[in-house]
Amino acid sequence: VAWDVYCPVLPPGWFVESGSYRLSSGGQLSITYRGPEGAHLAVREGAYCAGLPDCIPTGTEAGSARFGDRDARLLDLGSGSWLVVAVAEGGDVNWQATGSGMDGAILSGFTAAFARVGE
């Protein structure tokens, strides 16, 4: 793909629950992890929002964050869910991680440790 792919680096107790990818229309990757005590982490990367206005969930701004080596935003989605999102210049490619069963600081710590594939 023409965009950077990031791989979560998670502590012990996390495993892949489901995932998919496609290369058409700019490509996209989606993978969900399940962690301790029912926590979930859903990661989406690529052109999954291309042509879809308002694709990224809205929430209350909760500060800055990192998605690997990218600047990102932390949003409180309510009901115990958090979102870290980074948008490429031009807006056609996005990276987002949604966490539930954890607080925003934990999700931000996870996303800051994401490793860019090929690095």
Image: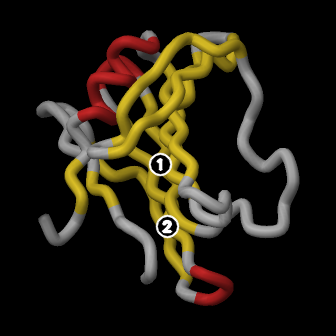
Amino acid at the residue labelled 2: Leu
Q: Position of residue 7 (x, y in %)?
A: 27, 55
- Please name the amino acid that badge 1 sits on: Val
Q: Secondary structure at mark 1?
A: strand
Q: Which residue is mark 2?
A: 29
Quadrant of image for the C terminus: bottom left
Task: Name the side, left or right, on which 4 lies relative to 72.
Answer: left
On the image, numbered disc 1 is attached to which residue? 43
Q: In the rendering, at what x and y percent does residue 66 appear?
A: 36, 33
Mark 2 secondary-structure assignment: strand
Precedes in sequence: disc 1 or disc 2: 2
Number of labelled discs? 2
Residue at 52% across / 22% down in the picture? 74
**Mark 2 residue crowding within 10 angstroms, few (<14) / some (14–19) / many (20+):** some
Say which residue appears at 65% left-offset and 62% top-offset.
Answer: 90
Q: Residues within 10 Å of mark 1 (few under 14, many from 20)?
A: many
Whether residues under marks 1 and 2 lie with C-beta atoms below 8 angstroms apart, the answer is: yes
Quadrant of residue 71 within the rendered picture: top left
Q: Going 50% across and 70% down the picture, which residue do you hit?
A: 20
| Residue at the front extreme, as displayed | 89
Quadrant for the N terminus, please.
bottom left
Q: Residue furthest right?
A: 53
